[in-house]
Amino acid sequence: MENIRVGVIGFGNMGGAHTAAIANGDIPGLKLAGICDNDAAKRTLAGEWYPGIPTFAEHEELLSSGLVDAVIVATPHCFHASIAAEAMRAGLHVLSEKPADVSVSRAREAITAAHETGKVYAIMFNQRTNPLFRRAKELVESGALGERKRAVWIITNWYRTQAYYDSGSWRATWGGEGGGVLLNQAPHNLDLLQWIFGMPRRIRAFCSVAKYHHIEVEDDATIYAEYENGATATFITTTGEYPGTNRLEISGDLGKLVLEDGKLKWWRLSEHEREFCFSSSIGMYQPEVSYEEILPSEPETAHRGILRNFAEAILYGVPLIAPGEEGIRELTLSNAAYLSSWTDDWAELPLDEARYAKLLQERVDASNQTPLFVSHGSAQEYSERWQVRW
């Protein structure tokens, strides 16, 4: 196979940008072969922008057309896993937009299909391509920071106006999106937090609904997490604060990392702090410390990087940067945060998936929006707001 024939399901902003990248030849090995959207106006627009490319009203028609080898799923969140599973069982590889779905229990359908079929299943965690986050992961996993102690991420530069939420009735509703800032904007950051620092054992969260906007979901959240080794993490995010901050600090008993303003700052201790604490005979003494500042060694390849990796995984067996099954970890964090906030209690991990699904469904049933397979807006280029912004 020289070229992978790709169909894009959901011709909205993200789907439109992915379509353009493939059609423009930016992704070696991928060839645009079909576009699906159940909005007739979107199909007309797709026909105008990409003449000669077949369009489909229903994703089932695309999956059974014989015209594609792989699909990109860029629909509303609640369709991600079910369509991905259908596609893999139809013999197609899948790259899904984030999040994996709206709940862990729903996301498992796609993971099961991937295991059963052996098809490539990836997820669009494009911020994993950022070289500073990749370097931070290497340092933590190599033991360069020693025993993990604490992570603190203030990620409040996801600012949105009321006009953003008013642009579609599905936005910021339990029925339309399945959540607020934690499910729409912050999945990238929650994914990176677990990717670098690991998964906690329990979560306590406070999610404020409509604190800054007229919406039915949270636009401000604070998560506190505890880990098996005693480490902790704090995650603070909102769409109602400007100017915002993007600052990740990770501490261990051999030093500290700070990622902010497009650089990684690394403080290295000469010995393990815990050993120093109990061996020193001087009360106000401190370990020797050195400092290094790391700048990006290469550009952030973002969405195009994930698309290229997806193609290479299919063609050459290259390991995925963001395997689809890892999407369940990020989703576990947001689901656990909601569960904790709703019950005013700790959410233990592994997550009580049945309880979460029940409480989520109650909110969906009472929502002002019913889930519809409708995309909104179309793009021909990736927006800078979808990449890491410092």
Image: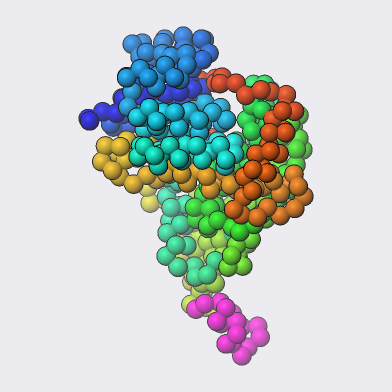
Q: Where is residue 29 shown, x and y percent of the image?
A: 28, 31
Q: Is residue 161 left or right of residue 381?
A: right
Furthest residue toward left: 2
Residue 280 covered by magenta stretch: yes
For image coordinates 61% across by 67% down, the residue present is 230
For image coordinates 65% across by 83% down, the residue present is 284
For image coordinates 47% across by 62% down, the residue present is 140
Is residue 299 visible in the rendered structure shown here? no
Q: Decide which of 360, 154 is in the foreground and name it.
A: 360
State the quadrant of the N terminus.
top left
For image coordinates 53% across by 48% down, the residue present is 329
Q: Where is residue 265 shown, x and y percent of the image?
A: 50, 60
Q: Is residue 10 left or right of residue 277?
A: left
Q: Is residue 167 above or below residue 254?
A: above
State the quadrant of the C terminus.
top right
Q: Where is residue 35 shown, x and y percent of the image?
A: 41, 18
Is residue 359 visible in the rendered structure shown here? yes
Q: Quadrant of residue 338?
A: top right
Q: Is residue 143 left or right of residue 355?
A: left
Q: Quadrant of residue 227?
A: bottom right
Residue 221 covered by magenta stretch: no
Q: Is residue 213 above or below residue 23?
A: below
Q: Where is residue 300 shown, x and y percent of the image?
A: 42, 43
Q: Is residue 153 above or below residue 144?
A: above
| Range of residues picked out in magenta | 271-286
